[in-house]
Image: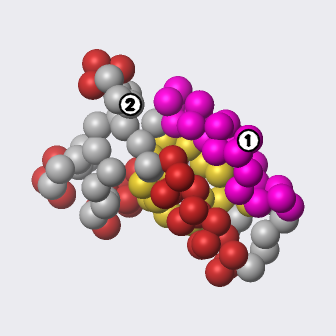
Amino acid sequence: MEELQGFQRKYLRGLAHGIKPVVFVGQKGVTDAVILSMEEALNAHELIKVKFIDFKEKESKQVLSEELKDRTDSCLAGTIGHMSIFYRPHKDPKKRQITVPKTRKDIPA
């Protein structure tokens, strides 16, 4: 998936503000079960939050977020505290719920 621009990540972080985390990463880190639940959540919602329970260091959360991004072919919209926000548009264009603005002018007021 192509990399998001800064204003697009900001737009997605704004949309994610009110949602609760749906995937939790515990002490075992990124497992196949975490990837599977993340795949299901991205297919259902397109925009999700992942909470890191046992990882308090910023560097470890960044490494895990990059691994999740790569293994699920999604985009990392941002990391806030112990949560990361991921976005992946639905494969079927008719089922897409979120439209990411292409330019700054396209952002709804």
The amino acid type of the residue labelled 2 equals His
Compared to residue 6, the image places residue 94 above or below, namely: above
> Where does the magenta region start and end?
21-45
Q: Calculate the distance from the C-alpha at mark 2 to the C-alpha at mark 1.
A: 21 Å
Q: Is residue 2 above or below residue 38?
A: below
- Check whether the beta carbons of the residues at disc 2 and disc 1 lie within 8 A of each other: no
* Residue 37 among magenta residues: yes
Quadrant of the image occupied by residue 28: bottom right
- The residue drawn where x is 49% and y is 57% is 70
The answer to whether residue 39 is left or right of residue 73 is right
Query: Looking at numbered disc 1 in the image, what kind of residue is underneath it?
Result: Ala
Displayed quadrant of residue 37: top right
Task: Give SS at disc 1.
Answer: helix
Question: Relative to residue 9, is residue 32 depicted above or below?
Answer: above
Q: Earlier in the sequence, mark 2 or mark 1?
A: 1
The front one of 10 and 92 is 92
Q: Residues within 10 Å of mark 2 (few under 14, many from 20)?
A: some
Tell which of 62 and 101 is nearer to you.
62
In this view, 3 is above or below 1: below
Residue beneath the point at 27% across and 25% down: 93
Residue underneath mark 1: 33
Question: Which residue lies at the image location 46% right of the left edge and 36% below the top edge?
Answer: 46
Q: Residue furthest top?
A: 94
Any magenta on residue 63?
Answer: no
Front tag of 2 and 1: 1
Q: Residue 51 at what x, y percent from top left?
A: 71, 54
Q: Looking at the image, can residue 25 be seen?
A: yes
Give coordinates of residue 75: x percent, y percent: 42, 54
Residue 27: x and y in percent read 86, 61
Task: Report which residue position mark 2 lands on.
Answer: 90
Asked which secondary structure carries label 2, the reply is loop
x and y percentages locating residue 84 in the rendered image: 59, 59
